[in-house]
């Protein structure tokens, strides 16, 4: 038996063809051809779902793949890129210890933030000082990119780590998009007054590490435009 003939048994659609032939016979009539095509489409979705679940099991996350739907991470991630996600372990970023609880604390209660103008004359974050450590936004480009669910926008965000905060009441992170045109401020810089966020922030208060959906390990450029075309995200 030739390699080509052997290889066909690795194709799951071979078994679908055999099943359809047994039930409906050769697809000679138009109606039978329609049945075949519907079966192929449904089977393709089933295979994709099973592969997705298997990939999630291997990578240890519920969401192993995600599509970048905005320009907030340009030029490092583009709209339409598919990112591959694994567990948010061993995060690559600076860690700062804080000897107090910071849950439900506005960022300005625990940090000093310095701003500057971007090329369009708009205010952007230049640096953040926590305890005695100063972190400059220009220096975080090698930090890991993580995924979390925004509690102000109720959607998944793919942004870069600014810093890991090891506080008295748990572990937290601050994040920011790479694009200084669209995401000029740290995601958690809400400027909360009387419980209302005055800035257009993405997450009230520092983000607990245990709520992260994962970190990015790779990307497939522009493959996600298929999804964006269907759902107009």
Image (cartoon, rainbow, N blue to C red):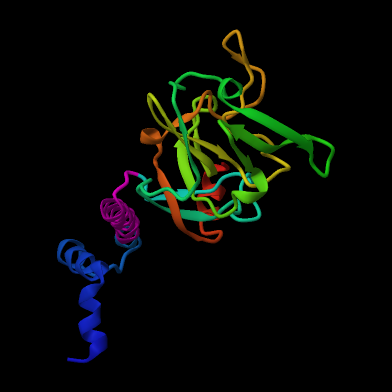
Q: Quadrant of the N terminus?
A: bottom left
Main SS class of the magenta portion in the image? helix
Residue 195: quadrant of the picture: top right
Observer able to see residue 186: no
In the orientation shown, which residue stands out farthest toward the left? 22
- 211 sits left or right of 123 in the view: left
- 220 sits left or right of 201 in the view: left
Q: Does 52 sit above or below residue 109? A: below
Q: Quadrant of the C terminus?
A: top right
In the orientation shown, which residue stands out farthest toward the front? 132
Observer able to see residue 102: yes
Query: Residue at point 24% right, 81% down?
Result: 7
Query: Residue at point 16% right, 61% down?
Result: 23
How far across and how far down the image is residue 47, in percent? 29, 57
Whether residue 58 appears in magenta in the rendering, the answer is: yes
Whether residue 12 appears in magenta in the rendering, the answer is: no
The part of the chain drawn in magenta is: 34-62
How far across and how far down the image is residue 3, in percent? 24, 89
Between 39 and 157, the one lying in front of the other is: 157
Between 29 and 130, the one lying in front of the other is: 130
How far across and how far down the image is residue 173, in percent? 48, 36
Between 104 and 146, the one lying in front of the other is: 104
- 150 sits left or right of 70 in the view: left
């Amino acid at each position: 038996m030739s390699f080509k003939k052997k290889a066909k048994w690795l194709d799951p659609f071979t078994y679908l063809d055999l099943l359809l032939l047994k039930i409906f016979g050769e697809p000679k009539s138009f109606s039978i051809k329609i049945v075949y095509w519907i079966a192929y489409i449904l089977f393709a979705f089933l295979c994709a779902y099973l592969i997705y679940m298997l990939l999630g099991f291997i990578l240890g996350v519920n969401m192993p793949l995600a599509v970048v739907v905005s320009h907030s991470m340009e030029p490092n991630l583009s709209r339409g890129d598919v990112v591959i996600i694994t567990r948010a372990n061993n995060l690559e970023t600076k860690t700062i210890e804080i000897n107090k609880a910071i849950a439900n604390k506005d960022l300005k209660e625990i940090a000093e933030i310095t701003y500057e103008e971007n090329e369009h004359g708009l205010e952007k974050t230049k640096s953040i000082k926590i305890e005695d450590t100063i972190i400059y936004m220009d220096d975080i480009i090698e930090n890991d990119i993580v995924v979390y669910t925004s509690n102000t926008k109720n959607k998944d965000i793919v942004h870069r780590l600014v810093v890991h905060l090891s506080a008295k009441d748990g572990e937290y992170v601050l994040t920011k998009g790479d694009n200084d045109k669209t995401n000029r401020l740290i995601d958690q810089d809400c400027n909360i007054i009387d419980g209302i966020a005055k800035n257009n922030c993405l997450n009230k208060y520092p983000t607990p590490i245990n709520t992260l959906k994962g970190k990015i390990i790779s990307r497939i450029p522009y493959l996600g435009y298929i999804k964006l075309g269907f759902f107009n995200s």
